[in-house]
Image (tube, rainbow, N blue to C red):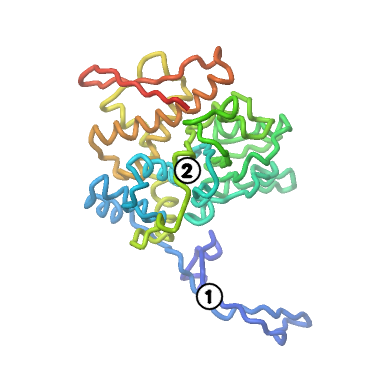
Amino acid sequence: MVTRYERLLMAGAWCNIRVDYDDSFKIGNRVYPFVIQRLEPVQVGRVDLREYLAGRAQFTRTEWIDVLIRTMGYESSHPVFTDRVKLLYLIRLIPLVESNYHMIELGPRQTGKSFSFTEFSPYGTLLAGGAVTVPKLFVSNTNPPRFGLVTQRDVVGFDEVAGSTFDAEQDKNLYKSYMENGQINRGTINVPGEAGFVFNGNINFDPRRSMQADHLFKPLPAGIADDTAFHDRWSAYLPGWEIPKLTPELFTRHVGFILDYTSELFHRELRRIGHYGALWERWFEATEGQWSARDRRSINRTFSGLTKLLFPSGEMEQDDARLMLRMAIELRLRVRVQLHKISPQEFPLTAFSYRDRDTGREESVTIEA
C-alpha cells in the first residue's frame, strides 16, 4: 500500500480509515488496542496540467468563474453573487496558487474567511486565535533545528488575529523580513519558505457607511495596528464587508471540481508554472512616479494569481487583463489608503492610474474606504 500510495508517508493524504478497539492485540507485553482494520486513500495522487488547460479552453471567462465558485461550494447563479463578489471570493484562493502571497481580510463574521485554509486544501493551515510561536512558524533553536510552517505549507492563515500579540520587536521583525524577502535569518540559520500569510479578523461595521476606527488596520493587535512598515508588505486588503454572510441558499447543489483534485492541481502545477505578473504590460503601463517597488510587486502578484485561476495557460484578451489589473490595483490601493491615514507624509497618494499603450488614455483607480 505504501508503494502504491507513496504520498501516505511522503506528504500525507486524506484517507477513509476504520479503527477497531481490540485489547487482545499485543506486541511483546504491551497492549495496542486501537487497530486500523481498513485504510483507503481518497485523495488524488496525480494531476495533468495539460488536461486541465484543454478543459479550461472549452469555457468562457464567465463560465469558468462559475465553475470555480461552485467548486468552492457556492451557488454562482444566486443574485448575491455579482461579478465583483465572485472575483472577491476567488481572491481568497490566490495564496494557494501564488507563492509568498500575503493578504489581509477584515469583515463580518460568518462569511467563510477561513474556509480556504481549513477545507479547500490540505496545503493550507489555520492558526485559530492567531496565536503561534516563532519556532512553530519559522524555525526552532533546537539541535538539530526544526523548520516551521512557512517551509511546510502553501499558506498560513491567522484567524481572529485581533486576539494575537505582536509585542516582541524581534519577533515582529521576523514577520517583516519574511514578508519582504520570502526568508528569514535566525541566528546562523537561513529559513526560506513559499507560504503566504493571510490575516483574518472580524469587524462589526461597514466602512462604506460609517467609520468607527482611525483606519482599517486599527482592529489588529496594538503591536502592529499602527506599524506602517508591517502593513506596507501586504499585497492586498480584501474588503470582507462586501462579501455576504453565508446562508443555506448560497450553497450550491450543482457540481464543481472535487477538492482533492483542485488542491493537488493548485499545489503541484499552478504554483510551479511561473509568474504571470507582467502579462498585463502587453497592453498597459503604470503611470510614471506613482507606484513604489512594493506597489508594483504586490499588483503583479495579485494579477499573477488571478491569471493562474482564470487563465492558467496565460492566454487572455485585453479586456480580461484590464479586469484583473484593476482588481489587483484596487486591493493594493486599499492598503495604501490606510497607510495614508496613518502617515500622510510618508504615503501621500490615494489613487493609482495606468495607461493604455494603444490609445494613450490614462485610466484611474480610486476607492473611498
Report the Cα–Cα distance between label 1 and label 2.
31 Å
Looking at this view, is 287 or 84 the one in front? 84
* Residue 275 coordinates in the image, percent (x, y): 39, 37
* Residue 189 coordinates in the image, percent (x, y): 67, 38
**Is disc 1 surrounded by few (<14), some (14 to 19) or many (20+) residues within 10 Å?**
few
Left or right, 336 with respect to 66, comes to right
- Residue at the image position 54 percent from the left and 22 percent from the top: 339
Q: In the picture shown, does residue 341 fall above or below 19?
A: above
Looking at this view, is 343 or 286 the one in front? 343
Q: Give yes or no for contact between labels 1 and 2 (Cβ–Cβ under 8 Å).
A: no
Viewer-nearest of labels 1 and 2? 2
> Badge 1 is on which residue?
39
Looking at this view, is 141 or 320 the one in front? 320
Left or right, 143 with respect to 344, comes to right
**Is disc 2 surrounded by few (<14), some (14 to 19) or many (20+) residues within 10 Å?**
many
Residue type indicated by callout 1 = Leu
* Residue 306 coordinates in the image, percent (x, y): 37, 40
Mark found first going from the N terminus, 1 or 2: 1
Secondary structure type for disc 2: helix
Residue 271: name its quadrant.
Answer: top left
Q: In the picture shown, does residue 103 fall above or below 144?
A: above
Q: In the picture shown, does residue 172 fall above or below 33?
A: above
Q: In the picture shown, does residue 236 fall above or below 214?
A: below
> Badge 2 is on which residue?
95
Secondary structure type for disc 1: strand
Residue type indicated by callout 2 = Pro
How many numbered dots are placed on residues in this image? 2
Residue 182: name its quadrant.
Answer: top right
